Amino acid sequence: MPARPSSKRTTETVLGTGANRQAATIGAIAITTLVFTTPTMVVGLEWLNCLIPLPVYYFLRVYGQKQGAVIITLALGLAGGLTLWSGNLPSLLFSLTLMPIGLILARADRENESAQRAGLTSVGYLVLVWLITGWLMGLATQSNPYLELRQNLDKGFEATFSLYRDSGRFPAGDLEGIKTLITQLREQVARLFPALLLTSIICTVWLNIVAGQWLLKRRDPTRTDREDLKNWRLPELLVWPVIMTGSLLLLPEERLNTLGLNAGLVLLVLYLSQGLAIIASLMQRWSLSLLVRTIIYSLLFMQIYGFVLVAVLGLADVWVDFRKQRLTKDVDDTSVS
């Protein structure tokens, strides 16, 4: 495998020197500050919290550890001042629990660690931090943050039904059907809430890995990635939890059935990511255009069946090995170079 260019050389080549580099640094600070503050200061954009690790990961790799740390520190200071002024500092502090994921991914990238191991470390970190944070908050407020979060979701469902009811645009029969649907949805969300939390963590980490590597490759096309994400795969031993989960779903005991549903949802997301890697690899092998790829992805994810199909494809890869030809080619190319 060809040696990766040194961080200093790569930084100078990509960013340039002098005034251009200074302007780029100021822009990096502004972008990082914007990513840190927008989810806490703009109502309705809280979902952007999932992108908080991205500028940390990206700028630490583009600028190097020392200058990247300066950029992140200055951005943190500006974000703290803005949220303190607006009264949103507590929200920012909780959101910043995601920031170390960027540090983990940047370190893993720098040390050529596999995406699988970096992702597992990031997920483990966030689960541990959120458990400790919830426990400390519970001690400080004499409450249960998990139950409070569940109750807030229930209030959200109730508010949604109130909007339909108060709009005056639906007859009584339709409102009754809507109420029944919302009630069923609320019950299922409550039942699957642990898995929903875990899958949100997994998706956040995966999003930052994919987006970070894509941005770094666009910034520096000569970059040699530590691992092509199109070739990554889950451990084969994970098939056994799939079998055990299927067995739990067949049992009449409600608690075991609920455990199986939660485990099944997490495994679905994991094998969905592997299925996406297979599809991306095959489309690259067939040299499909961007338009065709966009159409295929759209058709796959227009309905829930598409998600299941992609996840089944990821699971079947354990036995079929859809990317064997692609992986062999990658190894040969690496050996030649």
Image (cartoon, rainbow, N blue to C red):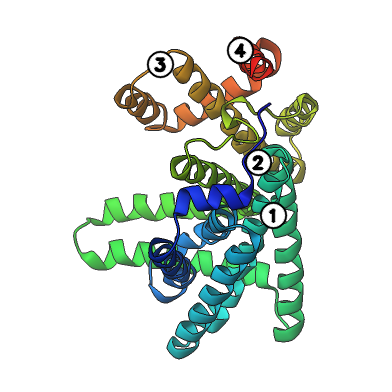
Q: Marks 4 and 1, Cα distance to the nearest angstrom?
A: 30 Å
Q: Between residues 319 and 119, which one lies in front from this camera angle?
A: 119
Q: Amino acid at mark 3?
A: Ser
The residue indicated by pointer 2 is 266
Question: How busy is the neighbourhood of tag 2: few (under 14 within 10 Å), some, or many (20 plus)?
Answer: many
> Disc 1 marks which residue?
104
Measured as percent of width and height from the top left, residue 160 is found at 37, 63
Spatial separation of the CA atoms under disc 2 and disc 1: 22 Å
Q: Amino acid at mark 4?
A: Lys
Upstream in the sequence, badge 1 or badge 3?
Answer: 1
Between marks 4 and 3 in the image, the one whose residue lies nearer the viewer: 4
Quadrant in which the N terminus appears: top right
- In space, the residues marked 1 and 3 are separated at their CA atoms by 33 Å
Assess disc 3: are there few (<14), some (14-19) or many (≥20) residues with their C-alpha within 10 Å of its C-alpha.
few
Between label 4 and label 1, give the one nearer the viewer: 4
Looking at marks 4 and 2 on the same chain, the residue that comes earlier in the sequence is marked by 2
Say which of 105 and 255 sits in front: 105
Q: What's the CA distance linking mark 2 and mark 3?
A: 32 Å
Mark 3 lies on residue: 287
Q: Which residue is mark 4?
A: 329
